[in-house]
Amino acid sequence: MSSSAYGGALGTVVVTGAGSGVGAEAARMFHRLGARVIAVGRDPGATRALADELGIDGLTVDFADLADVHRLAGALSSLVPRIDVLAANAGGIPRARAATADGIEPIFQVNAIGPWLLTTLLAPRLAGGRVVATSSRSHTGASLTRGETATVATGTSGLGTHKVYARAKLSAGILLREFGRRHPEITVADFHPGVIASGFGRYLGPAGSVLTTLSRPFLDSPADGARRLVALATRTDGIDGTYFVHDRPAPGSPQLQDPALGAELWALAERLTAHHGPGATTSS
């Protein structure tokens, strides 16, 4: 993996999860710094409103639909010849608990497989740039077992929602570092942005809304998380392969740096997405 410092003015920055919260605030901050920003969100209305506000390109994607991820990658490749920063901020806990149309456990697909697919498809555009992913400190409470990683794609094994999410974020971090090993010309890093006062708890329904309201005075704002993302995307010291909490390097799970797990999860990701790749066929 590359350890070169990031220098020069910001060029093109793609921000996923830009429809609201940290992603929207980060898009505004990158725009103020003079970058060409492409905002990517799930909600068409919110994404269009942000794009109109800033006078930038706005695209949509549903990471629970692998065909839609391919569509987004094609649209981005048509728009720009190079991406200097991919701010991979999208993620969360979808309401649906049934397998996606792609046959994958939804939390795992939205947080690990969908973002991985987009990053790998954009690799030619990212050469010499960097990927900064939004992680979660919850990943440190999860673990994966070699030889059994395929099970994370098909079921929850009786785990609660938060543990499934933590396992997905751990998987995403392992895949990110494996991507860095396979693409040493691209710098990779991820970070825990803080406990953000956003709509993340909406999957809990009314109880989640009440909890968020009561705890809001003790939470970080989306702008706080965005500042940390932008700082990480623009810092000039070596960050490659590093996990950060806020703006400081942190240990993270030791499994993040496990190359055997990385290779195993990579092979799993390739199998899960193979039917959407070049030359793939669909059955009727």
Image (cartoon, helix red, strand yellow):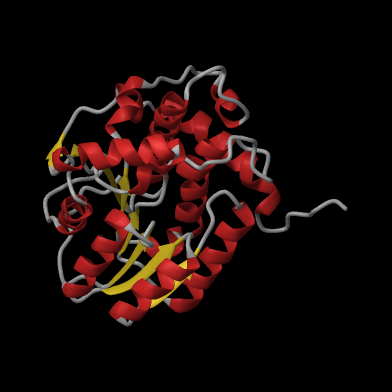
Is 235 placed left or right of 77 in the picture? left
Q: Is residue 64 visible?
A: yes
Comparing 222 with 269, the one in front is: 222
Residue found farthest to the bottom:
55
Q: In the image, residue 139 lies at what x, y percent?
A: 34, 28
In which quarter of the view is residue 256 placed? top left
| Residue in view at x 55 percent, y 18 percent | 147
Q: In the image, residue 105 lies at what x, y percent?
A: 59, 34
Q: Is residue 195 visible?
A: no
Is 191 placed left or right of 102 in the picture? left
Q: Is residue 77 above or below residue 279?
A: below
Q: Is residue 167 above or below residue 198?
A: above
Is 26 placed left or right of 66 in the picture? left
Q: Is residue 143 above or below residue 252?
A: above
| Residue in view at x 40 percent, y 51 percent | 90
Q: In the image, residue 149 lies at what x, y percent?
A: 54, 24
In which quarter of the view is residue 233 placed? bottom left
Comparing 163 with 3, the one in front is: 163
Q: Which quadrant: the N terminus?
A: top left
Q: In the image, residue 67 lies at what x, y percent?
A: 63, 57
Q: Is residue 257 above or below residue 51?
A: above
Comparing 29 with 237, the one in front is: 29
| Residue in view at x 25 percent, y 28 percent | 252
